[in-house]
């Protein structure tokens, strides 16, 4: 694993240099809200504090999001937008791709989270915990996050999973556990390399898919075919 200093971790916030003046007002409010969640926690998120952080006239955040629920929804909406930029759907494998391509794409996205966007994970955890206390936020949070589930289920089905929904849940749980450990848990001072993450995904997918998929004909000539399409056997 690669050691990570507290200084480098602190620069990987939702908006590392603060809300951009060129962003829309909604984006500036959302960025400021996420920054405050990372730095001060849920108690530090107020309409006045968001105005100050975003560099907006006093009362601007209240005009955009009049209630605390509306402010939290603004933060969740911006969280989803920023996470979509980290996951970059266009880099994910399309129909017909093998498990090897899926492994590469997942390792890239996870490594990007852990090296450049760890504070974005912290803001997500703050919002997720608050959602456990607010049923109305829970519904909004779940609906917003579900946009990432469908594509993963489809990719697992295309990779040959006999139970794509269950396997997608297991894959998400593995990723979430690793990200939490490296962002806020006992492994916060080290980050797995992309190669280490790729190995982890390979092992996980082999356990899920077993021999249910055909070997990848595009594997290198010297590699022994793996039961999982697209992953050469070691």
Image: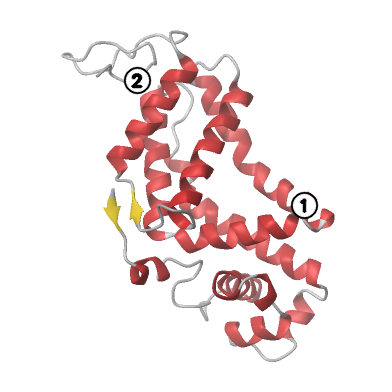
Considering depth in this image, is 129 or 115 the residue closer to the camera?
129
- Residue at 63% x, 61% y is 126
Q: Is residue 149 left or right of residue 196?
A: right
Res 109 → quadrant:
top left
At mark 2, the secondary structure is loop
> Which residue in the structure is indicated by mark 2?
230
Considering depth in this image, is 32 or 129 the residue closer to the camera?
129
Res 196 → quadrant:
top left
- Outermost residue, bottom side: 57
Ranked by sequence position, the earlier of labels 2 and 1 is 1
Res 127 → quadrant:
bottom right
Residue 188 vs 95, above or below: the answer is below
At mark 1, the secondary structure is helix
> Which residue in the structure is indicated by mark 1?
138
Q: Is residue 92 left or right of residue 149?
A: left
Considering depth in this image, is 81 or 134 the residue closer to the camera?
134
What is the x, y in percent for residue 11? 40, 70
- Residue at 36% x, 26% y is 100
- Outermost residue, front side: 186
What is the x, y in percent for residue 234? 24, 19
């Amino acid at each position: 694993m690669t050691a990570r200093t507290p200084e480098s971790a602190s620069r990987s916030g939702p908006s590392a240099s603060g809300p951009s003046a060129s962003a829309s007002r909604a984006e500036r409010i959302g960025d400021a809200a996420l920054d405050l969640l990372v730095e001060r926690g849920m108690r530090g998120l107020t309409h006045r504090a968001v105005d100050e952080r975003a560099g907006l006239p006093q009362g601007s955040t209240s005009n955009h999001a009049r209630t605390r629920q509306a402010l939290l929804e603004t933060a969740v909406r911006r969280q989803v937008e920023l996470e979509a930029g980290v996951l970059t759907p266009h880099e994910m494998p399309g129909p017909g791709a093998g498990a090897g391509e899926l492994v590469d794409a997942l390792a890239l996205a996870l490594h990007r989270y852990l090296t450049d966007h760890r504070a974005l994970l912290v803001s997500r955890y703050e919002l997720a915990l608050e959602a456990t206390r607010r049923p109305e936020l829970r519904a909004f949070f779940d609906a917003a996050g579900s946009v990432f589930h469908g594509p993963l289920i489809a990719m697992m089905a295309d990779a040959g999973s006999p139970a794509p929904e269950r396997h997608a849940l297991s894959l998400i749980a593995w990723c979430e556990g690793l990200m939490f450990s490296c962002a806020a848990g006992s492994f916060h001072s080290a980050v797995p390399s992309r190669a280490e993450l790729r190995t982890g995904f390979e092992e996980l997918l082999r356990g899920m898919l077993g021999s249910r998929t055909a070997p990848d004909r595009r594997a290198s000539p010297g590699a022994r075919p793996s039961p999982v399409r697209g992953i050469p056997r070691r």
